Image (cartoon, helix red, strand yellow):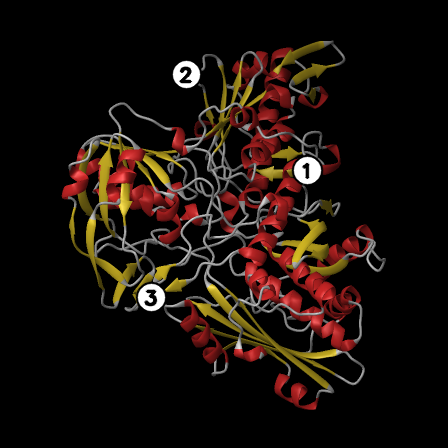
Amino acid sequence: MTKIKTHLNRRSFLKLSAAGGAGLMLQFSWFSSLASENPTIEEAFDLNGYIKIATDGTVTIASPNPEVGQNVKTSMPMIVAEELDVDWKNVKVVQAPLNTAIFTRQLAGGSRSINESWNALRMAGATARHMLVQAAAKSWGVPASEIKVNAGTLTHNANGKTATFGEMASAASNIEVPKEVDVKDIKDFKIIRKSHLNVDGPSITTGKPVFGLDVYGENMVYASIVHPPAFGMKLESYDASEALSMKGVDSVFTIDVYPDDYERNRFDISAFPQLIVITGDSTWRIMKAKKTIKANWVPFSAYTVKMEGNSNGEKVPSGTENTEAHYTEMIKKSKENAKQVRKDGNPEKAFSEAAKVIERSYTAPYLAHSPLEPLNFYANVTADKAELIGPIQTPEFMEKSVAKRLGMNLDQIDIQMTRIGGGFGRKLFGHYLVEAALISQKLKKPVKLIYTREDDMTFGAYRPTYQATFRAALDKDNNMVAFHVKTGGIPESPLFANRFPAGAVPNYLAESWTIDSNITTAAFRAPRSNFMGAVEQAFLDEVAELAGKDPIDFRLELFDNAIKKPVGNKNDYEAKRYAGVLKLIKEKSNWGTSKNGLSRGVAAYFCHDSYVANVVDLKMVDGKPIIEKVHCAVDCGIVVNPVAAANMVEGGSVDGIGHALYSMLSLKGGVPQQRNYNDYHLIRNNDAPHDVEVHFVESDVHPTGLGEPPFAPAIGALANALYKETGKRYYHQPFMMDIESKYLQSEANV
């Protein structure tokens, strides 16, 4: 067994549950392993969270992280239950409330929930098990080493005594918390690595209230907002007389969510802080009434947003922007001098002496997150307390924001998390929570703020738009001897300078540039990786073709270089694990064999500490790609809950393919041209892959990310399969617009 230090004392660790009667309440830290990116098993933990063991043997485990569909509400308690050694059927899972005095990271984002809580959760379960064993040993007068634990039962074989956890819970409350505890050998896992269904599944399928839209309060009014129609504009005046005359409409007024002197945190992103608010007795009535509001919008001047941790703030330029102008500006920028981020060897010389050189450029548009559940939040703000209930990925950060904005203390803010009906990064940014709170504070009554789909899609916080230019040099033996990536975007660069093929090629250059904009952007599933992973893998296929090599073999040669003679010491990835998923996908997809008229493409990418390889099999029918199968190989360390993990890989693959084929948010004069699902094309059921087959690398490595890593390589494999099928390379997303000859073509590839 491996030991984990608890660094806890009995006073801070152990509490009896007054509400639940006799029983053992164990509080523990889920997230204090944030001190390092890859925490070791020996690290210490603080207290945050709880396990409650009732006298009937029921174990209640509270999950502090927001649930966005990634299934952490099931998988995290599984880790605790494993080390506790309780029968899973006796476990009850509940959503923990926000409590910054106890929890240190209540956030859903970055594919970090399991990765950063693994050791803490194991410590929690193992410590509880230790105390139960010690209580039984003391009660029975036997050595603790002779007591066996199995599925919630304590047994001493020599004297035949047994007790359930529930029967021993009260006695365990008098046991001193150990300084360190033994955790199980991985080979002894009984719950982890076994599939367990979503604990919220029955509630969701039977329509029980679990989402923010299900929340209602006594005397509650509904609220909706009107924001400027274009980025670069602000409100000057409005006339709401017609709306106020309509039945069911209570009030129309303005709010300034983030005043000029307000210092925002990084999750306070909002393109339109000055809003018109309309309230009434139903969503239908206020939606009808707000269409009658006559507002005068005027251009704003450039300004600077005050930001925590940024003494210079963030500059917001004036003017209304256009997609076509953005692409022209990005192409121009890609040909100018850029910031050098990494340089290995002498790439200039290598390119000048190369036998073959290839250069290609790629673009991708703004994307709207477009979760099925629109932005919404319930707020009831009184003089003494602010009760806030709804879907938010960053409750701890937004608690601080709303307290500051309302002029309240943190202990007066009560944020309660509901299950989130899709986020993909959009609900990391909680301006809508602050808006609901301000509306309730003004009205002095409970409020339910609901964005319409059009509000949600035109409010901003999009995936940035990107451009990348790659060059590769081959020697006379068709070995890649130099690689150059120059990339940027509006308003951020997607560059990861230390990722593959950095470290695998002797001469390497990475450069970056950016363009300012007043279009608000935000984290989107697999931030930056969702572009770079896709286009890098499409480019490498072209390099392999130029070298006359099989695309998998070509990549494996590069990884062999990185294993035997790595270049530089800042490479982010482990070459052996990277190569491992390629070898696994080659085996599982039967790469190299014909597939009944299907064309095949391959890609592999590393992000969020995980490795994913894909093979896509497709054919074209009447100008439309029919994706018969997506093969996936994944190395994410220990897989806690296989069925949930497979679901995430399947969903991420479909999501990536769908956005690459169909999705684009464009602007004319600062006005978003896509407003709802009828013109913002998401993948439909009949467009989705017919089958997604997932294979996990058997591993005993600390778990890593999974919600985001499958997104990017699925796009790269799709692009490469499309080339094999059509004979045409696809450099611009969404691919279907390129296929239909309607997409703006980059000058770099004309």
For marks 2 and 3, the one nearer the N-term is 2
Q: Quadrant of residue 646?
A: top right
Between the C-alphas of marks 3 and 1, the distance is: 48 Å
Residue 553 in sight: yes
The foreground one among 70 and 139 is 70
Give percent across and percent down for residue 265: 33, 53
Q: Nearer the viewer, mark 2 or mark 3?
A: 3
Residue lying at the far front of the rendered structure: 622
Q: Which residue is mark 2?
A: 18
Give percent across and percent down for residue 257: 24, 49
Quarter of the figure with the N terminus: top right
Between the C-alphas of marks 2 and 3, the distance is: 61 Å
Tag 2: amino acid:
Ala
Q: Which residue is found at the position 49% from the left and 67% from the top?
A: 466
The foreground one among 85 and 728 is 728
Tag 1: amino acid:
Pro
Q: Which residue is found at the position 65% from the left and 34% from the top?
A: 183
Residue 180 in sight: no
Q: Which residue is found at the position 73% from the left and 56% from the top?
A: 619
How many C-alpha atoms fall within 10 Å of the one at disc 2: few (<14), some, or many (≥20)? few
Check contact, mark 3 vs mark 1: CB within 8 A.
Answer: no
Q: Nearer the viewer, mark 3 or mark 1?
A: 3
Q: Which residue is mark 3?
A: 669
Q: Nearer the viewer, mark 2 or mark 1?
A: 1
Q: Which mark is residue 642?
A: 1
For marks 3 and 1, the one nearer the N-term is 1
Tag 3: amino acid:
Gly
Judge left or right: residue 722 versus residue 331: right
Between the C-alphas of marks 2 and 1, the distance is: 37 Å
**549 shown above or below 151:** below
How many C-alpha atoms fall within 10 Å of the one at disc 1: few (<14), some, or many (≥20)? some
Give percent across and percent down for residue 258: 25, 52
